[in-house]
């Protein structure tokens, strides 16, 4: 603990100490990646790109078959489901390393606007999924021209 | 194993590759691909997750029993869009392994499908000699 300079108006408060401790902890953990501390990352990791027309969501799904990917859109909510199948390996094998996971996954993402469900497109290429989600026509921002009266 | 389990969340984070003493000429990030390596009586199989690569952008070399996997990924940014929420970054892949078994270099096969690299490295002597341990 740091030594405090003498302050006649300073009174010890446990709440203040707690707050100081909390700040200190936050500062410590800010330098550590979220994989080790804090929020557990969900699978798959997603990137969301947006503009006025809509959004593009990308996710890395190496080794997942196209038929095992299930995308559904309802209102402003995108749900991505999938199943990564384990490799078919013969018997009598010895694993040296096993770092690749497999299994079912589901992720739900809420977008800041409603989506035109009929115009959603998804492309799966080289293990990268790209979903384009156009914004619902009724919600698109309209430019309002100001008339001189 | 036939049962399916949920993918463990610790495995989603990409790990940045340490390029060692040599510096990369290309700018950008470089990741360590996740691999499965298993051995059969005849071969060693390497399976690596490298989303974004295709058969033309992977480079595999085997030199002095050191296997090097390099994958080149061109980050694609959707035109006219800006990233509003990002959970992963895109970059190249690099990883090296030293192989203890003698590999028949002529029989090496590599395929890339759906962002997964599969390497088939046949052993030079397929018959493994087992040494019997005698009770002393």
Image (cartoon, coloured by chain):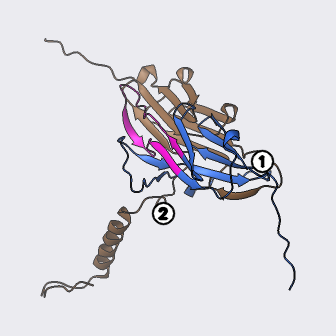
Observer-nearest residue: B118 or A104?
A: B118
Observer-nearest residue: A49 or B124?
A: B124
Query: What residue sits 23% from the left and 83% below the top?
Result: A2
Dot 1 alpha-carbon crowd within 10 angstroms: few under 14, some 14 to 19, many 20 or more: few
**Tag shown at residue A89:** 1
Establish whether labels 1 and 2 are both on one chain.
yes
Q: Which chain carries label 1?
A: A
In the rendered image, which quarter is residue A137 located in?
top left
Q: Which chain carries label 2?
A: A
Query: What residue sits 26% from the left and 18% below the top?
Result: A144
Quarter containing the N terminus of chain A: bottom left
- Residue placed under numbered mark 2 in the picture: A36
Chain whose colour in the figure is brown = A
For residue A113, say whether it is visible: yes
Chain whose colour in the figure is blue = B
Quarter containing the C terminus of chain A: top left
**What residue span does the magenta drawing correspond to?**
B69-95
Q: Do the residues labelled 1 and 2 touch (CB within 8 Å)?
A: no
Determine whether the residue tagged by mark 1 lies in a helix, strand or loop. loop
Determine whether the residue tagged by mark 2 lies in a helix, strand or loop. loop
Q: Where is residue B124 in the image (x, y as percent from the top left)?
A: 73, 49
């Amino acid at each position: 603990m740091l030594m405090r300079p003498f302050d006649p108006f300073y009174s010890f408060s446990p709440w203040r100490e707690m707050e100081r401790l909390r700040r200190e902890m936050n500062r410590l953990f800010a330098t550590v990646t979220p994989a080790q501390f804090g929020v557990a990352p969900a699978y798959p990791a997603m990137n969301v790109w947006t503009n006025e027309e809509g959004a593009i969501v990308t996710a890395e799904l190496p080794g997942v078959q196209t038929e095992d990917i299930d995308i559904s859109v309802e209102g402003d909510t995108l749900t991505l489901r999938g199943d990564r199948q384990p490799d078919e390996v013969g018997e009598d094998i010895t694993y040296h390393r096993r770092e690749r996971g497999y299994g079912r996954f589901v992720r739900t993402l809420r977008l800041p606007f409603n989506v035109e469900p009929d115009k959603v497109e998804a492309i799966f290429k080289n293990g990268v999924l790209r979903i384009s989600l156009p914004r619902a026509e009724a919600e698109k921002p309209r430019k309002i021209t100001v008339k001189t009266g | 194993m036939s049962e399916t389990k949920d993918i463990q969340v610790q495995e989603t984070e990409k790990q940045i590759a340490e390029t060692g003493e040599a510096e990369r000429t290309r700018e950008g990030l470089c990741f360590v691909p996740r691999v499965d390596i298993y051995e059969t009586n005849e071969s060693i199989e390497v399976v690596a997750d490298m989303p974004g690569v295709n058969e033309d952008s992977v480079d595999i070399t085997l030199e002095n029993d050191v296997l090097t996997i390099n994958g080149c990924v061109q980050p694609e940014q959707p035109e006219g869009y800006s990233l509003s929420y990002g959970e992963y970054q895109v970059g190249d892949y690099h990883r090296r392994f030293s192989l203890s078994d003698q590999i028949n270099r002529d029989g090496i096969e590599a395929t890339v499908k759906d962002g997964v690299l599969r390497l088939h490295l046949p052993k030079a002597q397929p018959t493994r000699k087992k040494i019997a341990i005698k009770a002393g």
